[in-house]
Amino acid sequence: MERFELHENGLNLVFEVTDEREIKFLHFSACPFEKSTLDSADGITGFRLAEVMVSGLDRPGERHGTKYVRTAPGYRLKYQDRKDYRNESGRKLEIWMTDEPTGLSVCSHLQFYDGIAMVRSWTVLENRGVEPLGVEYVSSFALTGIEKDGLMDPDEKLEVGIPYNAWQKELLWSRYTMDELGMSVSQPHETRRSSQTISVENTGNWSTKQHLPMGFLKNKEMNTMLFWQIEHNGSWYWEISDEDGHLYLQLSGPTEHQSHWWKNLKPGECFTSVPVSIGSVYGDIDEAGAQLTLYRRRIRRKNRDNETLSVIFNDYMNCLWGDPTTEKEIPLIDKAHEAGCEYFCVDCGWYSDGFWWDGVGEWLPSDKRFPGGLREVMDYIRSKGMIPGVWLELEVMGIRCPKADRVPDDWYFMRHGKKVYDRSRYQLDFRNPEVIAHADEVIDRLVRDYGVGYIKMDYNIEPGIGTEINADSAGDGLLGHNRAYLAWLDRVFARYPELIIENCSSGGLRMDYAMLSRYSIQSTSDQEDYVRYATIAANAPMALTPEQAAIWSYPLTEGDREEVIFNMVNVLLLRIHQSGHLVNISEERSELVKEAIAYYKEIRRDIRQALPFWPLGLSKYRDPWVSMGLRTEKKDYIAVWRRNSQGERVTIPVHHRRGQELTVKCGYPQEGNCRFAWNKESGELTVELPERISARLFECR
């Protein structure tokens, strides 16, 4: 037997190679390893480093149901070798295993990042045998014993955090006990094995239409957080369940059972699973959110936008609502310039004379909407010192698009011999070189002929499980498309490194770090109620970096002072997507917009390097008070929202500043008309907001 340990960036990992040449993953935690925690009757029967399921092989054991434990040949993989070295990111561990009867080689990759308590993990399969292998499941990360730190019963000490995400109600986290999720202990600990799972999944191309590909496990006894994200723009799956007296966590991309994915791995072929990332810290969401933010900044594409945090005006929300014309745009461009915006994006509708939903696909400007041509509007934007942008939905083609019937069926997702469409659009297949050429022609034309420097890349359909063309399964076709789309994006940014492309999918329905490691900015929602939007704004930094989180601000035409301030506080610690019909609001309220944007330009250098914290916890949509902060070494920014609270006072705990002398001011608006006080001993900021719907941003030095 051989046991080896890694201690890196506050993480403790322990592996064991048994006398039978099995590789066991015994420990991954901020806590040190305690051997006594594994003294169960079954010892370390499970604790497999990787689970792999291949068609036609028997699975031993009892009561596994559809759980991905004791997979075959996963359960019989033998340790072969390992490589432990450093690269430009940090330490890298690669562990090779093999299944001798099939000739399947499995390599688990663990990439560390210097100074960050997170690991990126993925699995590579290689068929070194003589027969094809039908792969039904492969884990990207598998960890058994997630309950073992501490002495308390898992039902008492563990909480699972699940992030719900849906159209206009994004970024909503809930915490559950094991009992509330059906995983309470119902038999002696050492024989604990059931058919129950805590499972969260996505099937389809809207990667976050129901949940974010994230989660966390809080150990209240040890005060630790285990947290994870799956970095994929299609189907994915994670589960927590029990095996041989222990709880386990497994993360993966698509599966056969959940998402119709099956891969026929031929001799000599390799398959790489989707990447995932996992971290562990002492503390709670503030500490986990900090590590996630550092990690996300490390893995994303280097780009100017996330350094400058430019202010964007978009003409859609509470403004033109997809009905742009030259006549409407010119006064809006003037007002956006006066407000201090730096980009101006013409949203949907610019390519059609009238109803445009089912006719999209050629992306040619409407002469009726723009009698002098779209270039006239783009040039006018540039004449005002702003960079022009347009809306696109490039992955689809409307069923009434003139080009739709002129191209062959293999341009589209196909199932059962029929084109796949949803909401009157066909789904284009980016594995097809002709589709890539079509997409490139549109991008090149917009940049070359119209001077476009910003693209709002929207996506408003869900084509389901995938496509059967040139694929081993529908899910295999979808995975191939997902990866081809990412590769296409990489080539676009290589050609146009200064081009900003916003990731939008009916708001935030593809808020994943396969996309966000490329895109510099992400639409968070289509939420039309600015009061509810405070929850989305406050929770956004748990899902993505603050400098990538685009939040709408849309002052109402018939609003008041507090409504404008609330709208602007929503955006000031993240990315400004300014909208609202600025032409139609009063001068006093226009000045509040200008003041907010000017203040944002003063503080945005801090935002790009700050770490988030949540003094009142992650927000729910009905919370009467909401707060989110960003902290730097010597300064904090704290947003406070009041939403119909009966009382006008709230106490904001700022624990990391306890004992420090702070100078607090209302950063926005300067005429705050509110009271606030800092208590050094308790580390609390007390705020009084007199209006039932109101918000303020405080600066603490």
Image (spheres, helix red, strand yellow):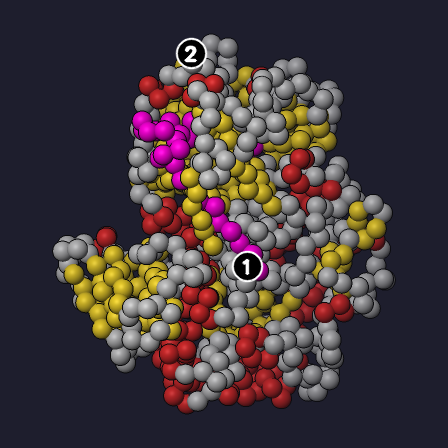
Image point (43%, 57%), residue name? 620
The amino acid at mark 1 is Gly
Q: Is residue 504 shown above or below 354?
A: above
What's the CA distance linking mark 1 and mark 2? Answer: 49 Å
Provide the residue span drawn in magenta.
139-167
x and y percentages locating residue 509 in the rendered image: 58, 56
The number of callouts visible is 2
Q: Is residue 90 magenta?
A: no
Image point (60%, 46%), residue name? 202
The amino acid at mark 2 is Met
Q: Is residue 158 magenta?
A: yes
Under circle 2, the secondary element is loop
Q: What residue is shown with label 1?
A: 508
- Visible in this render: residue 545? no
- Visible in this render: residue 170? yes
Image point (79%, 49%), residue name? 414
Please report whichever mark, 1 or 2, sits nearer to the chain's N-terminal start. Answer: 2
Residue 1, numbered label: 2
Q: Is residue 63 shown above or below 632?
A: above
Under circle 1, the secondary element is loop
Quadrant of the image containing the C terminus: bottom left
286 sits left or right of 194 in the view: left
The answer to which of 63 and 516 lies nearer the viewer is 63
Q: Is residue 200 shown above or below 517?
A: above
483 sits left or right of 228 in the view: right
Q: Mark 1: give few (<14), some (14-19) or many (20+) Cα within 10 Å.
A: many
x and y percentages locating residue 112 in the rendered image: 41, 37
Q: Residue 569 lies in what quarter of the image? A: bottom left
Quadrant of the image containing the N terminus: top left
Q: Residue 499 lies in what quarter of the image? A: bottom right
Q: Residue 167 lies in what quarter of the image? A: bottom right
Image point (45%, 31%), residue name? 184
